[in-house]
């Protein structure tokens, strides 16, 4: 009987972790635009905040990663679709300039693919 509870508890914990990391609702933040340049600052601390970014296609998009921790998990950011893999210095801002040519969803993640975010590029 006790074993069953342990098993159920474990299953519930796994389900929660999956929901938290992959399905929890996230508020989208639109990149600020000035003179055709889009810019958004992303705080890196146990995750990306915001983790869902909206941008317009065909316009330069500047992501400013503001890393507020030393945790090895977040030391690299990877934006596969743009061929970007960059080291984020702790307690500094790292600028990554993109120019999304096509509408679509582009994932970014830490080097281990644990922390995740998404850029949604609209027409
Ligand atoms: Cu990581």
Image (cartoon, rainbow, N blue to C red):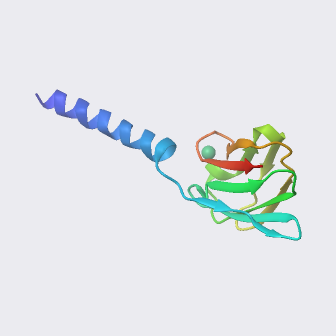
Residue at 73% across, 63% down: 31
What percent of the width, then of the height, locates residue 8? 24, 32
Question: In the drawing, does residue 114 fall left or right of residue 98?
Answer: left
The image position of residue 91, as x and y in percent, is 70, 67
Looking at this view, name the residue that lies furthest to the left.
1
> What is the tally of numbered marks visible in this picture?
0
Q: Quadrant of residue 43?
A: bottom right
Q: Nearer the viewer, residue 123 or 29?
A: 123
Q: Does residue 14 lie above or below 110 as drawn?
A: above
Which residue is at a point 48% across and 51% down the rendered structure image?
25
- The residue sitting at 13% across, 31% down in the picture is 2
Displayed-image quarter of ligand 1? top right
Q: Which residue sits furthest bottom?
A: 34
- Against 63, is 82 above or below? above
Determine whether, in the image, residue 50 is placed left or right of residue 13: right
Quarter-of-image position of residue 71? bottom right
Residue furthest front in the image: 123
Q: Is residue 101 left or right of residue 28?
A: right
Residue 56's place in the image compared with 107, above or below, is below
| Image location (x, y in percent) of residue 75 | 70, 52
| Place of residue 116 in the rendered image (x, y in percent of width and height, measured from the top left) | 61, 46
Is 29 situated above or below 114?
below
Quadrant (top left, top right, bottom left, bottom right) of the N terminus: top left
Which residue is found at the position 45% from the left and 47% from the top? 20
Q: Nearer the viewer, residue 92 or 107?
A: 107
């Amino acid at each position: 009987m006790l074993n069953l509870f342990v098993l159920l508890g474990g299953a519930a914990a796994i389900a929660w972790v999956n929901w938290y990391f992959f399905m929890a609702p996230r508020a989208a933040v639109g990149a600020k635009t000035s003179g055709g340049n889009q810019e958004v600052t992303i705080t890196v601390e146990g995750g990306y905040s915001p983790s869902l970014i909206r941008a317009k296609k065909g316009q330069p998009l500047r992501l400013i990663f503001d890393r507020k921790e030393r945790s090895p998990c977040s030391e690299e950011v990877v934006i596969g679709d743009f061929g970007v893999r960059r080291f984020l210095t702790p307690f500094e801002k790292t600028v990554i300039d993109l120019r999304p040519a096509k509408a679509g969803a582009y994932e970014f993640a830490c080097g281990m693919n644990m922390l995740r975010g998404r850029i949604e590029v609209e027409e």
